[in-house]
Amino acid sequence: MYRLSAPAHDEVRVRTRCHHCQHPFPTGPAGWLPPRNRCRHCHQSLGPPTAATITATTATCALITLRLPDSPLLPALLASAIAGLAAALVDLRCRRLPDLLVLPTAALCALAITITGIAQADPLHVARAFAGSAALATTLLILAVTTGGYGMGDVKAIAWTGLLAGWQGPTALLIAAAGPFVIQAPIALALLATKRVGRHSTLAFGPALLAAGLLAITVAA
């Protein structure tokens, strides 16, 4: 996750070296696996503890499996859980939802929904999923353009969560639409009250958006 947390203004979207010691990461798979939260050269922390990240990911996947054990979309949902948690952590660190996580996973979900709809001869579910995704993405895009409070990563991510929520049904879609704002509001107020942010500070919206997506597909299951 650290390697995907390049600053939003950086043209290179993947970190190639440790920001503490500037030692370059190995090229190829060796630079990514196994996942580490410390630099191999200077041993400085590069992110949350690996054990905590794995525990959170396992718990999220277990929750989805328990709530939707018979869903034909279960593999896509589990992939979304893993990618979503990683994307949320990256957003918290550098205020950016990486395309390398969001776009492939959203495409996988779109493909899974289309194939499932064809296999079940259920075009209405497919249409509802894509319509819900488009509606949420368009709404947030308008907010992003008019207020400047959201980024294009947020727009892409809500299209992703809206796709899965739209497949689940209207209740899930409503949670995916309103949930991010309901989750973000008390967090922002608490940070303002404790003076940890100012009135013009930019907060990461991705974690709230992705958490609402998780609630949408599990609560409305």
Image (cartoon, rainbow, N blue to C red):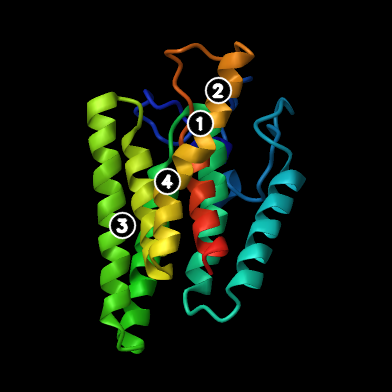
- The percent position of residue 198, horizontal first and vertical second, equals 50, 11
Q: Which mark is residue 103?
A: none
Q: Residue 169 is drawn in which quadrant?
A: bottom left
Residue named by callout 2: 189
- In three-dimensional space, the C-alpha distance between marks 1 and 2, rounded to whole angstroms, equals 6 Å
Mark 3 and mark 4: Cα distance apart in space: 14 Å
Residue at 56 percent of width and 63 percent of height? 218
Question: Residue beneath label 4, please?
Answer: 178
Most foreground residue, 148 or 115:
148
171 with respect to 211 (left or right):
left
Between the C-alphas of marks 3 and 1, the distance is 23 Å
Q: Amino acid at mark 1?
A: Ala
Q: Which mark is residue 185?
A: 1
Residue count near mark 4 (Cα–Cα under 10 Å), binned few <14, some 14–19, many ≥20: few
**Which quadrant of the structure image shows residue 134?**
bottom left
Q: What residue sits 25% from the left and 62% below the top?
A: 131
